[in-house]
Amino acid sequence: MIGGLFIYNHKGEVLISRVYRDDIGRNAVDAFRVNIIHARQQVRSPVTNIAHTSFFHAKRSNIWLAAATKQNVIMVFESLYKMCDVMAAYFGKISEDCWTPKENTVLTGNILDFGYPQNSETGALKTFITQQGVKSQITSQVTGQIGWRREGIKYRRNELFLDVLESVNLLMSPQGQVLSTNVSGRVVMKSYLSGMPECKFGMNDKIVIEKQGKGGRSEDGGKSSKQSIAIDDCTFHHCVRLSKFDSERSISFIPPDGEYELMRYRTTKDIILPFRVIPLVREVGRTKLEVKVVIKSNFKSSLLAQKIEVHIPTPLNTSGVQLICMKGKAKYKASENAIIWKIKRMAEMEESQISAEIKLLPTNDKKKWTRPPLSMNFEVRYLKVFESKLNYSDHDVIKWFVTSDEVESTRCAADAAGADEKKEGCPVTSSSSSSLLLFLLSAL
Amino acid sequence: MQEWANQLCENRQFGSKMTDSKYFTTTKKGEIFELKAELNSDKKEKKKEAVKKVIASMTVGKDVSALFPDVVNCMQTDNLELKKLVYLYLMNYAKSQPDMAIMAVNTFVKDCEDPNPLIRALAVRTMGCIRVDKITEYLCEPLRKCLKDEDPYVRKTAAVCVAKLHDINAQLVEDQGFLDTLKDLISDSNPMVVANAVAALSEIAESHPNSNLLDLNPQTINKLLTALNECTEWGQIFILDCLANYTPRDDRESQSICERVTPRLSHANSAVVLSAVKVLMKFMEMLPKDLDYYGTLLKKLAPPLVTLLSAEPELQYVALRNINLIVQRRPEILKHEMKVFFVKYNDPIYVKLEKLDIMIRLASQANIAQVLAELKEYATEVDVDFVRKAVRAIGRCAIKVEQSAERCVSTLLDLIQTKVNYVVQEAIVVIKDIFRKYPNKYESVIATLCENLDSLDEPEARAAMIWIVGEYAERIDNADELLESFLEGFHDESTQVQLQLLTAIVKLFLKKPTETQELVQQVLSLATQDSDNPDLRDRGYIYWRLLSTDPVAAKEVVLAEKPLISEETDLIEPTLLEELICHIGTLASVYHKPPSAFVEGSRGVQHKRLPGSAGSGESVESPDTGSAAGVSEAPPAVIPSQGDLLGDLLNLDLTPPTTTGPPPPSSGMQMGAMDLLGGGLDSLMGDESEPLGGDLGGSPAMGAGFGAPPAAMPASFTAPVSGGLDDLFDLGGGVGMPMGAYSPPKTVWLPAMKAKGLEISGTFARRAGVIQMEMTLTNKAMSVMTDFAIQFNRNSFGLAPAGPLQVLTPLSPNQSIEVTLPLNTVGPVMKMEPLNNLQVAVKNNIDVFYFSCQYPISMLFVEDGKMERQVFLATWKDIPNDNESQFQIKDCHLNSDAASNKLQGSNIFTIAKRTVEGQDMLYQSMKLTNGIWVLAELRVQAGNPNYTISLKCRAPEVSQCVFQSYEAVLKN
């Protein structure tokens, strides 16, 4: 198991060093710093072997987390991430200040014992930190079946928020051909409910999960009507009873208190791209670049996209940008090396365009501009809540809104020749965002 | 007394602050001193603050061990927070102050009885972390109590504590009976306690390989599976890992376990998912393939694996390394998922490289167009390593998917046109491989390659180019000029290039002897007289002597037809792959190395293997013999490659004491890569190091692996990857040669009564590469027999008489004559039943007689049936498992070396030998006259007269005959 846990700031100063096992010597702390944090070249692997000791490392907002071991251990990245999550939940953000002696003793002590990951439920660990030696049920809570929720929670208003965040990933060839698209969605819940509520989601009939495995991929499309939504895979928060999902297709759980990610899903079928983005890049000489981006909305008439934000990357040696846009506001942000174009709302089948003239500083750098992909964010709000169907007895208010947040990731072809070329992709939405709306929420 | 001192301290401090600050605050002692004072303060708040300061200093690495007694004094408090801090301090410093640590024991014992379960747990956890021998004996009693505590939190902490204690003093744990208590905890009502007990037991079991600590039986498995649904995510991982060590009794049991494990694939924690995948991959081996559930399971595995690729980059990397293993073992799982491995712009480089690797593994005729388009795209990226790998990948696609070769070549040519230096060099290296795979097909591109001659500055690319020029010298008009230009700086070139240049010029000379005599003399003298490199000198001398004694032989040797290169060059050796599959989700699966390669000491050196498959429907009684029972499709074990080779060569029994001196000190890897270029020596020396070189270059994972060679390696073996040792190996194998081929005793084929007095008995033999039919003709009739002639019916291998039957003198009554009839294998072919049946017609002056006989198939094993290791490896993998058949050879009392020698006499060549747990595994190959290769794995257990032999062949019909030959040869 994990022999040691080291946490450094971005300069490589040790914030925490905990050695759980004898086989990890004191010099391991330095070995990691010298070989990884202060390494000259780019790190080539998150798992490295230095002097017979294996290090797993991850970097989160300027903090280096490293786990050292000399044995053949299970993957501990998850526990490193969890530790960050706990920190973030406890302090609001991850920064150097998080690692004060008091908290870290408690945290690292309860997260790992003798290198075995023990507990990573944010809620429970918070209780550990605030624990003052008074008798409590914490011990039975963390070892019990519902380690993520303590008993006796009371709210005056019982509320449950459900956000569906989807990001649509698109990979497009330089010729404009869609190579692959997928929607990965997250269902984030905020629950403020009293007692030990048992929550249950039913899956809409239209959702076909391929894992059922009976149909097989090819048959699926043929058999089911066009309405059906195929989900390739979904994963659930620890609180969801997986065996129940496997047998009955129902998502039943006792929710943790506060905010958590209930499920993730992924779908690749029948994705209708909500926007088309057509970029045109022209290199005029060595010091000038003309960029034109057209976006076209491509969704159903009943919907409205809001807070559209297009992120157009610019070369590193940009010296100035002139922008003309018909709709919305655009600004060049030197700190991000990008043009940010914001549009408040767009209805269906609208088109909008921006042109930019980018002045470049002449450089000797032979490296080509790698042409990072454009990305785009927007929200689609569905406000259809069928409250009548919700039979939550205590209070009758359930706020429910759905955000659709699309990120597009397109690879750019880099054609060295200066001629004009077309490139890039279009973000995207999915048919599946609406699908989740059809979940029937029933909190019993 | 203590109090008085405290007061004094405080007074002093007080005084110092008020009156004479200079006196006490010397910078050195100041801080510690102040802390000491604060620690001994009466005020609780102040104490607590002081302890916090101490811990803060400790955390950043300052030495605060001097405060040990003072901090320990603070231990007796009912403030939980303060207690925790003091305990943390103790864990850190107890080892450096063992005597004083005893001071803390009383408090620990007391705390273990505290009414607050948190304090009890904290005490027992901390005690385990104090690694001082003297303390351990005081630990036993409290630990025993805590293991039976009413609170599950204390029990689960105590369970881990047993593992800690075992680490300090294993004997004590056994004597005190903690192991039994721990075993009882597996049946605990609380899932978390179960999980920790499992984790602790698994770890303890690792250091006791033979103890039956984790006595897994269906009952405990059932308990574990129940706990699996209820415990924390980490507990689930411990339990799943433990489940993976269990061998189900039959396929039904393994199916039911699989069914209960599959829901875990939907867990948000990817470590849980990977552990579940491990269990499923392992138990799947036991499921019959025709079972519906088997197919369902395969389908269920793909989505979670793909989902892992949308996790954080570090996890993606881990997932990809594991997928790489899974794809090699069961390619069908992800064969439709090619697209998800397309590289994204913002993937970290390590993810990109791994994705590329998997893309090539999944490449097939169906998706090759897409893959190529992607690869071409990648070749224009910025990261040099990535671009190189992409270019190499294009070459690998060409070799793997024949239909795509042409497109790959044209893509490579496009890339060469970009004139980007490293792209061009990499492209030339892979084009050379393509030439070797498809000889005489793409030579039209040579002209384009030659244009870039000047830009090549890397040895590998130069060597590749030189090889191409030498190989196709007759089609390149100015080949001599080109090679001559390289020759100018001969001594500055790397060994790889020098060797290649030497071979290329000799090839050129053999092809165009008239114009290049001067050149060849020049290079030979450079290589033999001016070089310090023994490899180069030796090769030079060999050529020289060959050329001077027998140019025709030289031509045969140097310009011999080269064996085709194998498709997959960097496959993991099957036994290693099996072991790694058992380690999915652990460090071993990321390194692609067995745990023994990176774990020191006894831990983790147990080799795990996949369970053998049970025949459909029938259950295997004992799990241990599962793999040996019936026709097993499982353990195809082949020659170790790469890292294992080192160990293997050390294991080799280099029997001939008069070896050819120490291996050449040159760099082994270069030598290997050199031979990849197909130097003329290949055929001469039966060199096997060739694909090895390709391997080392091709897989970046190994780069890391070779970083730290084991220090214990004797110096003379530091370069065993080179051809040198391989040659020794060959010698070792060849020593037993003179035994000759086995030929069965003569049997009566045609009794006299059936043939009007002519009796024919005979046998078959292979002598000096010629198949012979040896017959004794006896005349038992009353009259003289003359005019003998013989004819064969069509048969399976096209055996036919190579000449007429030579019976010159008439055969008088009661006379016998010995006749030897040479045979060839160019006759008409027809499949016979049995396969080795031969129908013969013999004619004499009296009549025509027919009889049939069976020849041992070993007669058909040709002399060049020795496969190269790497080819063997690839072929073994390539042949579907269904073609494998297993036989038992009973009552054979030879040891493995003797057996190997004996078999070699019959052209059954041992390619490698491995010893695993007292069992010798011989990997052998033989080639039939019609070009069919048969691969064999012979397992010989010392002291056990029964051998097990597994045969793999693309034409599985021959297996039975081959087995019979084996038996005949070995028992003779």
Image: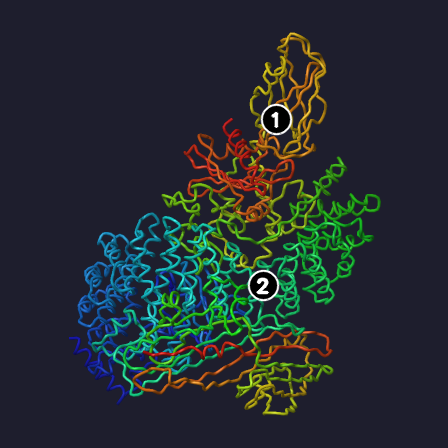
Q: What residue type is labelled 2?
A: Leu
Of the numbered discs 2 and 1, the one sitting upstream in the chain is 2
**Residue bearing the label numbered 2:** B356
Disc 2 and disc 1 in contact, CB within 8 angstroms: no
Image quarter in which the N terminus of chain B is found = bottom left
- Please say if B486 is above or below B885: below
Instruction: For mark 2, name the chain.
Output: B
Whether discs 2 and 1 lie on one chain: the answer is yes
Which percent across, then down, holds residue A365? 67, 76
Residue A35: in sight, yes or no?
A: no
Mark 1 nearby-residue class (10 Å; few <14, some 14–19, many ≥20): many
- Lateral position of residue B197 relative to residue A23, left or right: left
Which amino acid type is shown beneath numbered disc 1? Answer: Ala
Pick the residue in front: B50 or A378.
A378
Q: Which mark is residue B765?
A: 1
Whole-angstrom CA distance, mark 2 to mark 1, is 52 Å
Residue B125 lies left or right of residue B674; in this view the side is left
